[in-house]
Image: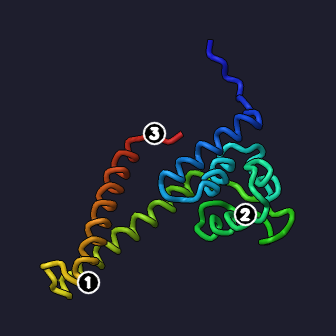
Amino acid sequence: MADTATHHPTREEVANYTDRVGQVFVSGDLPESWGRVAGYLMVCDPEAQTAVQISQGTRLSTEEVGGILCAFAGARAIQQNGEPGGADTTFQMPPRAHWEELFRTRARMVAELRDLTGEELDLVNDREGRGPGRRLRDVHDLYSRVAEGLGKAREAGSRVPRQ
């Protein structure tokens, strides 16, 4: 019979995990410290933590953690509970529904930017790719590929059963 007891990771296991998430962020050209904070918020217990607790769990300064939390909260990547800057203010990962809405919003933005850059390409009429035409073409191509990938991910995700 499989063991169904919940495993509560040790501080060392949490530190190892947060470091690994930090390295994934580095591979995506984002600061390692951002990944460590994100990773910590995925596995910390209790799930709502103060900046001081997050600082201790990630081995980052409270000031650095505070800046990261402000950026994450501003991007709606985390939930902030309490008054900004308050000592008892806690932060946590939002529920799944929030992430789904956040990604839908970002996907719509990518599609809108793809369409907008396509319209502008028609306006500048720079088929040779000089000046703004080259830059617009590069950005348009990128947004087109991202929009296509997001569409495929959305289709694949719709086949994944909800927990």
Residue 24 shown left or right of residue 160 in the figure = right
Residue 104 shown left or right of residue 2 in the figure = left
Q: Is residue 22 visible?
A: yes
Residue nearer the viewer, 141 or 154: 141
Q: Quadrant of the N terminus?
A: top right
Direction top: furthest residue: 1
Image x and y of residue 79, in percent: 68, 61
Residue 98 shown left or right of residue 28 in the figure = right
Question: Of the numbered discs in the image, which one, if any, rests on residue 161?
Answer: 3
Q: CA distance from mark 1 to mark 3?
A: 45 Å
**Is the residue 15 above or below the residue 53 in the image?**
above
- Looking at the rendered structure, the secondary structure element under dot 2 is helix
Amino acid tagged 3:
Pro
Q: Quadrant of residue 69?
A: bottom right
- Looking at the rendered structure, the secondary structure element under dot 3 is loop
Amino acid tagged 2:
Glu
Q: Mark 2 highlights which residue?
A: 64
Direction right: furthest residue: 87
Seen at 77% across and 37% down, the residue is: 11
Residue nearer the viewer, 84 or 97: 84
Q: Mark 1 highlights which residue?
A: 132
Image x and y of residue 129, in percent: 18, 78
Q: Earlier in the sequence, mark 2 or mark 3?
A: 2
- Looking at the rendered structure, the secondary structure element under dot 1 is helix
Image x and y of residue 24, in percent: 53, 48
